[in-house]
Amino acid sequence: MNVIVVGCGRVGAELAYRLYKKGNQVTVIDQVEAAFGNLPPDFRGRTVEGQVLNQDVLRRAGIAKADGLAAVTNLDSTNAVVAHIAHTVYHVPSIVVRNYDPHWRPLHEAFGQQVVSSASWGAQRTEEMLYHEKVYTVFSAGNGEVEIYEFAIPEAWHGRRVGELVPESQCVAVALTRAGQAMLPNADSRLEACDLLHVSATMEGSVALRKRLAGEKEG
């Protein structure tokens, strides 16, 4: 792939290097020349110094032939505008935008951009890890709005139905594994101790599920 990384801070430099090491042609843009010092010494991609909103700078970076662009500066307005230009003017097929301040996420969503919000995702993951129940996140979609959780059925739930355990709102049972064999469960499926259950849930759904597992009342 021919990829442009806009912004050479810690995130941009790490992303550019990872892409380069996997054989992609990588060009990094930053308006501060010293920022390129964040790149590892063995990085052999291109660097372009200049104002990232300047279309001449984008053209010098090869945006007309780019397969992908990642806007990862620490300014949400800049990331949004660069991504919008790449999409509407140059028709870059794959564009990803970094959301630096969670309050700016609606701006990116209004543009219909693929967004990675490290602050929102990191806060949610930290919150989840503070819980003591052994309910593990195995997949996170978007910025963590919906995740898939895995947990073993405790002895107290042996013989009860999936529908009794899984909240009706914001939580869906997606797979039940017993003795190494997986099946698609429904609300009437009977649980056995040590079964592995995978559920897809929002944060609110996962909290309700944890309360049911712990035998707490849902408020």
Image (cartoon, rainbow, N blue to C red):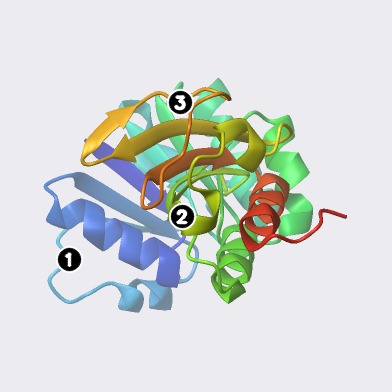
Whether residue 71 appears in this view of the structure is yes
Q: What residue do we see at 32% from left, 38% from top? A: 177
Q: Quadrant of residue 130?
A: bottom right
The kind of secondary structure element at disc 3 is loop
Rate crowding at label 1 as few (under 14), some (14 to 19) or many (20 or more) other CA atoms within 10 Å: some
Above/below status of 20 relative to 41: above
Tell me how far mark 1 sits from mark 2, CA to CA.
34 Å
Q: Which mark is residue 52?
A: none
- Would residue 192 be found to the left or right of residue 88 on screen? left
Above/below status of 177 relative to 10: above
Name the residue beneath numbered marker 2.
137
**In the image, what residue type sits under mark 3?**
Pro
Q: Which mark is residue 185?
A: 3
Marks 2 and 3, the one that precedes in the sequence: 2
**In the image, what residue type sits under mark 1?**
Phe
Name the residue beneath numbered marker 1.
43
- Would residue 105 be found to the left or right of residue 177 on screen? right
Whether residue 62 appears in this view of the structure is no
Residue 71, percent across and down?
A: 50, 49
Q: Residue furthest front?
A: 159
Please name whichever residue, 83 or 99, is drawn nearer the observer in this view of the structure. Answer: 99
Residue 134, percent across and down?
A: 48, 65
Please name whichever residue, 215 or 75, is drawn nearer the observer in this view of the structure. Answer: 215
Q: What residue do we see at 22% from left, 41% from top? A: 179
Residues at discs 1 and 2 in contact (Cβ within 8 Å): no
- Would residue 34 be found to the left or right of residue 133 on screen? left
